[in-house]
Amino acid sequence: MNTEPPTGDDLQRMLVSMKQTVLDRAEDRRPAPRRRGRRTGIAIGVIALLGLGATSGGVALGMIPQPFTAAPAPTSTPTRTPSPAPSTPAAAPVVDEPLPTPTPTRRPYDAADPSTWTVSGDEFGPVALGGPTAGETDDLVTAYVRDPGADVCSPDFGGAWKRDGAPDLTVWSEGTVIGVTASVPLGTASTGVSGPTTAEGIGVGSTLDEIRSAYPDAAEDRERSSAPDTLPAPNAYTSWKVDTGSGPVWFALDSDGVRVRSVEIGRISQISCD
């Protein structure tokens, strides 16, 4: 069975045949002549309706080919979303920084003025531990005068050095410098003499409270303190050891137990006099 819709001449013949059939039926049913006009109008209307119906039906049923095809639906091209601009970080909050704590300043070093000399764990002004004795003590002549009377105790003794208004200086030696001591006689620590001090300003004449404030870890060194049976009161004294970062420094208190009477670094040689 042919299911293809009629086209071309076949379609025209079908339309003519349908039209003729309608006209024949209309002619058979035609009434008296006086109603002809009305019947003719009806027939023409029916033919027109049939023609329109046939055409519409043919299009609807696919009987009449359609010369036009629908254009393909437009495809949407995805639009590229621009990347968001990098956000600029907000400025960091301003934080008030604490002002730096001022560090104690010392007077410029002066070889002729022992009060400008600094005492550390390995140096006492111009004298350094471990250096040859002659080379380390030759700088002392600018500020001190050597006491030759003390040299008879030992050929390796580095000498006792004196200066008016300053602590006496003793250099302990065993071929090289092993220790240095600045001191005043017992009972005279409060006379106000001026001599070398640590970077924190502690020296002869300073108090025990000042030592503890500058060096919270300061502790009494009983091995350096005087034995009561050797130096009984009022001549006994205690020695306090502090750490300066480059080595220990000892502060011996006067017999009052308040003020420093000597400052020492290194070790003391065992010297005996004949």
Image: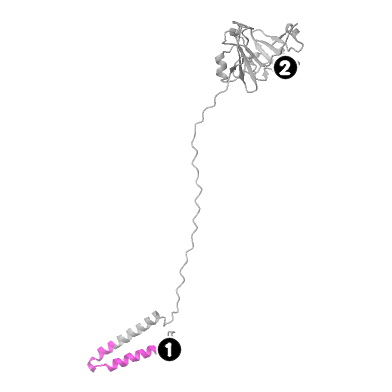
83 on left or right of 116 = left
Q: Residue at x 39, y 82 (%)?
A: 58
Residue identified by numbered label 2: 177
Q: Name the image quarter holding residue 135.
A: top right
Vertical arrangement, residue 79 with respect to residue 229, above or below: below
27 inside magenta stretch? yes
**Left or right, residue 59 beside residue 100:** left
* Relative to 147, residue 84 above or below: below
- Please identify the residue farthest to the front as the structure is shown: 229
Residue 176: x %, y % from top left: 74, 17
Q: In the picture shown, does residue 236 fall above or below 84?
A: above
Instruction: State the image quarter where residue 257 is shown.
Output: top right
Q: Amino acid at mark 1?
A: Asp
133 or 271: nearer the eye? 271
Q: Is residue 217 magenta?
A: no
Nearest the camera: 233 or 146? 233
Q: Tell me the kind of residue under disc 2.
A: Val
User: SS at mark 2?
Assistant: strand
Q: Which mark is residue 235?
A: none
Nearest-to-viewer mark from 2 and 1:
2
Image coordinates of residue 126 in percent, x first then y, are 69, 17
* Pick the front one: 26 or 248: 248
**Whole-percent x and y of residue 233?**
59, 5
What residue range appears in magenta?
A: 14-42
Mark 2 vs 1, N-terminal side = 1
Residue with the mark numbered 1: 10
**Residue projecting furthest to the right:** 155
